[in-house]
Image (cartoon, grey):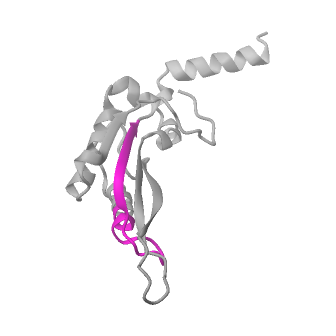
Amino acid sequence: MMPARSHWVVIAAVTVLSGCAASPELVSCLDPNRRVAVEVTGFKVTPPPKTAEGAKPGKPGRQNVTMSVQVQGSSAWDVGSAVLKAEGRAELDGMLKEIASGAGKDTRPTNVEVVIVTGHNDRLEERKTPGLSEQRAKVVTDYLVSKGVSSKVIFWEGRGARDPVAVTKFCDA
């Protein structure tokens, strides 16, 4: 009779070796790791301080701004693909709108200084499509440039399956 612990190890090994590792449940479990992270740093100009009448006006100030967005999962990327879907473009468009016209009551635009685009993919994609994370990062970079962000301030890289997002349900590949 096999001990209970060994029994589960055998079942897990048979499941992986039988091809169940690429099941739809596993693909959806790894969904958060199919992503491109975009981080923008810049500043907003603050109005000069109010001065007494007749006094020399002050200089405008500077408020540092950092914003980020994750273009992630099935809504943005098909498995194994570097084609940005409409929902992913909408995420980026929301960030671009916030850069151009602020958010909420603060309608000051953000002067963009640096944009860092980091592509990721899940472990299954890493095995089947090497270089996919770089392709996704490049697609997002090209999209941002097409929308008016200067290519001189964008830095991009692919991280592959490194830095995975922790998933909240059982996920084994």
- For this view, does 112 lie left or right of residue 163? left
Magenta stretch containing residue 56, yes or no? no
Residue 90: where, in percent of width, then height? 35, 61
Q: Is residue 4 above or below residue 77?
A: above
Give residue 109's quadrant in the image.
bottom left
Numbered-mark total? 0
Residue 37: image location, x then y, percent: 42, 45
Q: In the displayed structure, does residue 135 sit left or right of residue 50?
A: left
Q: Is residue 88 or residue 66 the one in the foreground? A: 66
Looking at the rendered image, the quarter that the N terminus falls into is top right
Q: Residue at x 53, y 22 (%)?
A: 16
The reply to whether the magenta stretch includes residue 101 is: yes
Q: Is residue 134 visible from the viewing direction of this image?
A: yes
Q: Position of residue 14 (x, y in %)?
A: 57, 18
Q: Compared to 17, does 22 lie above or below?
A: below
Q: Residue furthest bottom?
A: 53
State whether residue 83 appears in this view.
no
Q: Hey, which residue is sitting farthest left in the picture?
A: 146
Position of residue 101 relative to residue 29, above or below, is below
The segment highlighted magenta reads: 96-120
Q: Where is residue 30 drawn, in percent x and y?
A: 50, 38
Q: In this view of the protein, which residue sits in the foreground, 19 or 54?
A: 54
**Residue drawn at x 30%, y 45% as measured from the top left:** 154
In the image: residue 57, left or right of residue 132: right
> Does residue 64 sit above or below 98 in this rendering?
above
Q: Nearer the viewer, residue 79 or 44?
A: 44
Residue at image position (46%, 90%) is 53
